[in-house]
Image (tube, grey):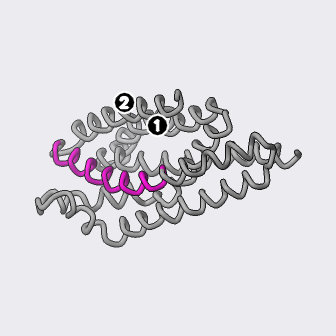
Amino acid sequence: GMSPFFINAAACVVVIIINKGLRSYGENGDMSIAAYGIANRMQFIFVMIVLGLTQGMQPIVGYNYGAKLFERMTRALKLTAMCATCVMGMLWLFGLVWPEGFIRLFTHDELLIAQSIAPARVMLCTMVMVGFPMVVGNFYTSIGMSGKAIFLSLTRQVIFLIPCILLMPLLFQALHFTPIWGVWWSLPICDAMATVLAAIVLNRDMRIFRQY
C-alpha cells in the first residue's frame, strides 16, 4: 500500500505548488487555478478508466509472474498498455481538436471557458503518453517490486515536476515570454520525461525476464 500512498501524497503537494505558481504568475490567479482545475478534471475522467484497466491487469500479471509464465505476463502487460494508450489518446485528440466541449461540462462562464482552452491544449498535448507509465507503475506493484513503482511515480510527481514548476516560469521570464506559461508547459514536459524513464526501466527488466 505504500506505492499508492506516496502517489496520492505527492499529488496533493504538487497541486499546492501548481496552484501557488498559477496564483503568483497569472494576471488573474483565481481564473488560472480554475482553468487548471477544469483541465485536471478532464484528465481525471480518462485516468480513472486507465486505473480500472491496471487493476484488472494486476491479478493476471501477479499470478503469471509468480508461476514464472513470463510470456503470458508480458502479453497482459502489452495489452493493458495498448488499451491505456488508446484511452488517453482519445483525451489527447479531444483536448487538441475540441477542448471547449469538455470545458463546457464544468462551467458556463464564457470568460473562464476562453481562458481555459489554450492551457487545456498545453496540458493535454502529451496525454497519449500518460497511460504507459501508469501501467508500468502498476505492473511493478503487481509483481511485488513496490520500490520501483514508488520510484517511477515520485520521479514524475516530485523529482521532475516540482523543479520544473519552480524553474520554468523563471526561464520563460528570462526569454521574455509570459512566465505563467512556464507552469503550464511544466506538466506535459514532465509527462514526456516520465514516459521515457518508464520505458527505459521496463526495457531493462524485460531483458532479464526473457532469460528465464
Can you tell which quarter of the image residue 39 is in? bottom left
- Residue 175 within the magenta-colored segment of the rendering: no
Q: Is residue 80 left or right of residue 43?
A: right
Residue 168: x %, y % from top left: 40, 41
Marks 1 and 2 close (CB-CB < 8 Å):
yes
Residues rendered magenta in the picture = 30-51
Q: Give the class, few, some or many, for how many residues have Cα within 10 Å of label 2's Cα (few <14, many ≥20).
A: few
Q: Give the class, few, some or many, for how many residues have Cα within 10 Å of label 1's Cα (few <14, many ≥20).
A: many
Q: Is residue 122 left or right of residue 150?
A: left
Amino acid of disc 1: Gln
Residue that label 1 marks? 157
Residue 73: x %, y % from top left: 72, 51
Residue 162 to residue 86: above or below? above
Residue that label 2 marks? 13
Can you tell which quarter of the image residue 107 is in? bottom left
- Name of the residue lying farthest toward the right: 211
- Name of the residue lying farthest toward the top: 2
Residue 97 to residue 75: above or below? below
Asked whether 148 or 161 is in front, the reply is 148
Amino acid of disc 2: Val
Instruction: Report the residue at 41% width, 47% height from top.
Output: 187
Query: The residue tagged with tag 1: helix, strand or loop?
Result: helix
Residue 60: x %, y % from top left: 66, 49
Instruction: Report the residue at 62% width, 31% height from top.
Output: 146
Prevailing secondary structure class for the magenta stretch in the rendered image? helix
Residue 73 to residue 21: above or below? below
